Amino acid sequence: MLVETKRLLVRRFAASDAPALHALLSDPEVMRYLEPPYSREQTERFLRQAGLCEPPLVYAVTQKRGGALIGQLIWHPWDENAMELGWLLRRDQWGKGFAGELTEAALTLTRGDVVLECCPEQRATRHIALRFGFVLAEERDGLLVFRRQGT
């Protein structure tokens, strides 16, 4: 397990997570600011290339109560000085504070810088970035790049 919060467990993906991951990545609203919804084949390729690789680029987010996969945590090196943080959550889990809970937990994993990027239209993500002390560092390829200095 990568990290545990009050309500969530963040763990490595397993091949058996493919159906639940596909439900997440095929939802047009979840994927709105990222890319077109994934097909099953795209989901399986993504799982192999980003979740089952060494080291993983993304991790499974599950509820402690019941163990349902409700999203993914993006956590991997951004550059030699920073880790990238991000998350995708099932639409029925939005508005429950899970993104903030995941951000707080992920920030305990490193003393170095952490980067969070998003589309300018992603108000919720920008809000979380600012709430946790990230500052707008640059705009890159149409995305806002927020950086939080390490401690």
Image (cartoon, rainbow, N blue to C red):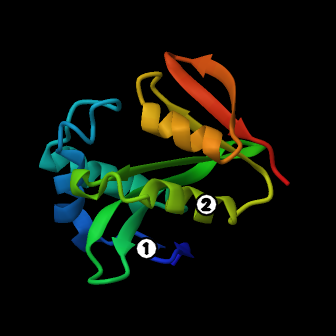
Q: Is residue 63 above or below residue 141?
A: below
Percent x, y for residue 116? 58, 39
- Residue at 55% across, 54% down: 75
The answer to which of marks 2 and 1 sits earlier in the sequence is 1
Quadrant in the picture for residue 69: bottom left
Q: Between residue 33 and residue 7, name the one nearer to us.
A: 7
Mark 2 → mark 1, Cα distance in angstroms: 12 Å
Residue 151 is left or right of residue 118, and the answer is right
Which amino acid lies under the numbered mark 2 shown in the image of this protein? Glu
Kind of residue sitting beneath label 1:
Leu
- Element type where label 1 sits in the image: strand
The residue indicated by pointer 2 is: 104
- What residue is shown with label 1? 8
SS at circle 2: helix
Label drawn at residue 112: none
Mark 1, other Cα within 10 Å: few <14 / some 14–19 / many ≥20: many
Q: Toward the viewer: 91 or 56?
A: 91
Q: Position of residue 88 (x, y in %)?
A: 37, 50
Q: Quadrant of the C terminus?
A: bottom right
